[in-house]
Image (cartoon, grey):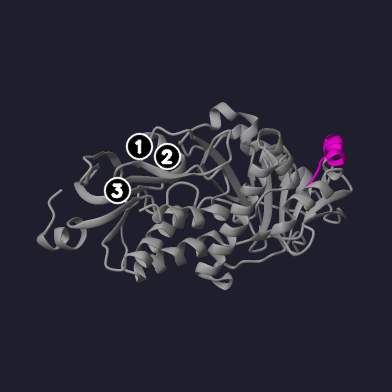
Amino acid sequence: MNFSYWDNKSWLNNIDFIIIGSGIVGLSCAIELKNNHPKAKVLVLEKGLMPYGASTRNAGFACFGSMTEILNDLNNHSEKEVFNLISQRVSGLKKLRNLIGDKKIDYKELGGNEIFLHADRDVFESSAMEIEKINSLIAPLFDNKVFSIKDNNFGFNNAHKKIIYNNYEGQIDTAKMMSNLLFKARQMGVKILNNINVKDFQDDNSKIHIRTNFFEINCNKLFIATNGFSNSLLNEDISPARAQVLITKPIENLRIKGTFHLDQGYYYFRNIDKRILLGGGRNLDFNAENTTKFKISDKIQNKLEDLLFNVILPSYNSVEIEHRWTGIMGISKKKTTITKQVSENVYCGIRLGGMGIAVGTQVGSNLAKLI
């Protein structure tokens, strides 16, 4: 591409830090870099028109794990590891809220509700028996008990009469979060280029040479914040995981408020703008959903519709689905994030494990502090 003198001078020369990815991690990293190095020239390269992976494509849950998710994590991690995971998520949410402000992200702590279908009665009973244990495990992080059993008064069909309630779960407006992160970064002097696909990079120990779909560029330090898309640039223990979501048209007299989990967190829904936003179903076909393609799956969307009409909203008439979309997460069998130095001048903050809202701001901040 043929650039002008002004383009080269302002955008493409003498770059101190380049960040790949303008999601939660990338922008939080950029903001932290400018805080620590005010005079540095910081450039963010983004593959899409807007953040491309999961930062603008999630459900807007400000959560740190449902009861069954935490119990499942204990099957694969030590109690100390699970405590550290939850601690990171709790502190990350606080950092996000402090960085932007609750009003600007429309933060509402309406509580989290885990529901169980009749077929999962045994799961409910075994989970309920562990409430005291989990509350004790995470007690140092909270002022009061987190989990309790409450009556299911939401009118769900084919569901157990009791739910496991989380006092400290909230929800946000994802678009407002990303808009304010973008505004804050630009206000601090961070430059952002969209539609830039990084093909590869070379670290020669003195500088980084980056090749993109439009130009080649050099910088002093490179930060990779591409999460589910990281396999094209890095050799790390991370796999893409597609999440599928639908949202209804506005529903008159919608009484459902809060965030909801079902089937160990593989399904989740919430209220937003008098609508129900519902996502999940990756467990129906793990292999097919281990992809970076944004294609909608009929198999999963049919299951989401079944839950919507036959479980969540059985007593509401004329509910219509308005929109469907997908997002790409970065996961592994290990739930811990990867924040590390890759080579002399290259660093990465990836593998958010479906908890990007909770941990993304902290990961981005920690990433910037590696230099």
- The numbered mark, 2 or 3, whose residue comes first in the sequence reads 3
Across and down, in percent, residue 36 comes to 36, 65
The reply to whether discs 2 and 3 touch (Cβ–Cβ < 8 Å) is no
Across and down, in percent, residue 240 comes to 49, 36
Is 232 above or below relative to 184?
above
Q: Callout 1, which amino acid?
A: Leu
In the visual, does 104 lie left or right of 310? left
Q: CA distance from mark 1 to mark 2?
A: 8 Å
Q: Which of the numbered marks, if any, corresponds to residue 145?
A: none
How packed mark 2 is, by other alpha carbons closer than 10 Å (few <14, some 14-19, many 20 or more), is many
Q: Which residue is mark 2?
A: 229
The reply to whether discs 1 and 2 touch (Cβ–Cβ < 8 Å) is yes
Across and down, in percent, residue 164 comes to 81, 50
Q: Which residue is mark 3?
A: 196
The answer to if 120 sits in the magenta stretch is yes
Give the number of callouts: 3
Q: Nearer the viewer, residue 256 or 264?
A: 264
Q: Which residue is mark 1?
A: 233
In the visual, does 64 lie left or right of 147? left
Q: CA distance from mark 3 to mark 1?
A: 14 Å
Is 367 above or below relative to 299?
below
SS at circle 2: helix
Residue at 15 percent across and 61 percent down: it is 9
How packed mark 1 is, by other alpha carbons closer than 10 Å (few <14, some 14-19, many 20 or more), is few
- The numbered mark, 3 or 1, whose residue comes first in the sequence reads 3
Report the span colored magenta: 115-126
Across and down, in percent, residue 167 comes to 76, 60
The answer to if 246 sits in the magenta stretch is no
Please identify, in this view, whether the residue under mark 2 or under mark 3 is nearer the observer: 2
Q: Callout 2, which amino acid?
A: Phe
Please identify, in this view, whether the residue under mark 1 or under mark 2 is nearer the observer: 1
